[in-house]
Amino acid sequence: MGTQTATRISKAFMFDPDLETISREALTALQTVRLKQTLDRAYANVPHYRKKFDAAGVNPAGFKGLSDIVRFPFTLKNDLRDNYPFGMFAVPHEQILRIHASSGTTGKPTVVGYTKGDLSTWADLMARCFACAGAVPGDIVHNAYGYGLFTGGLGAHYGAERLGCAVVPVSGGGTERQVTLLTDFKASVLCATPSYALNIAEVAQKMRVDLKQSALRIGLFGAEPWSDAMRSDLESRLGLKAVDVYGLSEIMGPGVACECHSVQAGLHGWEDHFLFEIIDPETLQSLPMGATGELVITTLTKEAQPMIRYRTRDITRLSNVPCACGRTHVRILRVTGRNDDMLIIRGVNVYPSQVEAVLVGFPGLAPHYQIVLTREGALDEMTVEVELAPTFTGDRFGKANEVTHHIKSLIGVTCKVAVKSEGEVPRSQGKAVRVVDRRSKAN
Ligand code: DLL
């Protein structure tokens, strides 16, 4: 009865109730048909896939059911780079309506194309996410995700419009103006990276604007790893419910998965459009439900650019425990980091988000930090740069020792802590730069 009530209540917050609460049997049947179509299309229309499938001795003609997916080869970011710019497209160029690209720190950017159908699916799935986060038609959405080649701005934009919200397409930067617009336009939903949302909160405080008294109700935050400590901090500074949204450009953009505002324990991954697997990044073997590993995604409906077993590098685990919100789609637990962001300091594996979880809310500190890596001889050293809260008046040395001790006892790694004054740790304008690598210069 309790679950039924929860289901009935939260259906008011579903964009597509029938598909969001679809039975497992129906979902499996739908995924099977769509996966077969995707494999066929990839094999027939993308020479890269044909070559890779042939080399692996697999052919979509032999596909019988979902579990056959493990026989197909993985797709890596490098495959997109090697086929730069349009070699992964599965449709003629006239059918491509939008092109996004990731900046990438090294090498060629990765390019993603969308057909009219893909753009419509993306808007639908992002609308699902907004509703899942608690937004309703009529909400005013302040969209501070960057507009441009990055998928955040336009992805959130069309999803919010699809749900029936008014969008303020403000993009990133010009933070004082953002604060003014947020209050003047009475936005009820804020879309931003968590680190930029923190920047907005801090600038508002300096301007003596209390955003807790504003109309803001929901923060739809994602595009970078963030901790529960950061969630509480943002909720108390901004007076909203902070909801996690996940996605990546290679697969679509934002909107691949989203937390439901009623339960907030994992992000519902939209399984009618994506097949999710977890693999061991070392052995590349599939892992069972609940095990931690690398998330691998296959698109089931993407027309322009089907992705077969794309290795996201994101570390997480899946849960198929039924959710009280009534949605039946698998939950992706909070992504704590990417395996290529993992630092190994004196043999201890550390993700920046673990450091964040220690620092945010730490007495006397502002929630800004950066990790600087250097090399002393053969050993990597980690210095955590933290910033004093404006109200702090005590002993800086003592604070540094206290933080060092907490990081050691909670994460198990020995590091140096550099205590900075207010404003000295760089502020985020979009995706925060958490790690500064000075190791090559030291050699
Ligand atoms: O960041 C898409 C996006 C925009 C997602 C706005 C959510 C909101 P990319 O620039 O291709 O796309 O970066 C994708 O960012 O593989 C993760 O490593 C990380 N990421 C995205 N969302 C989350 C999240 C967009 N909620 C990469 N938690 C992904 C942790 C995230 N990491």
Image (spheres, helix red, strand yellow):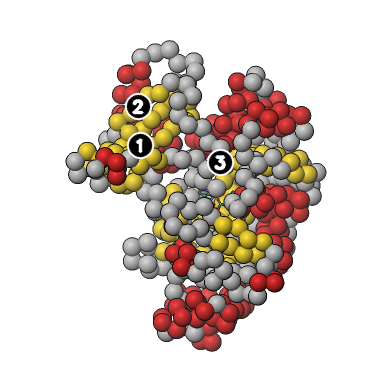
Q: Quadrant of residue 188?
A: top right
Disc 3 versus disc 2: distance between alpha carbons? 24 Å
Instruction: Look at the numbered discs 1 and 2 and tell me whether their residues touch, using CB distance below 8 Å.
Output: yes
- Mark nearer the N terminus (1 vs 2): 1
- Mark nearer the N terminus (1 vs 3): 1
Q: Which residue is labeled 2 in the image? A: 418
Disc 1 versus disc 3: distance between alpha carbons? 20 Å
Structural crowding at the residue carrying mark 2, measured as other residues with C-alpha within 10 Å and reported as few (<14), some (14–19) or many (≥20): many
Where residue 339 appears, as percent x and y from the top left, is 39, 53
| Horizontal relation, residue 184 to residue 241: left or right | right
- The kind of residue tagged 1 is Val
Q: Residue at x 59, y 35 (%)?
A: 197
Where residue 338 appears, as percent x and y from the top left, is 43, 52
Q: Along the line of sight, which residue is nearer the eye, 411 or 126?
A: 126
Q: Which residue is labeled 1 in the image? A: 372
Label of residue 430 in the image: 3
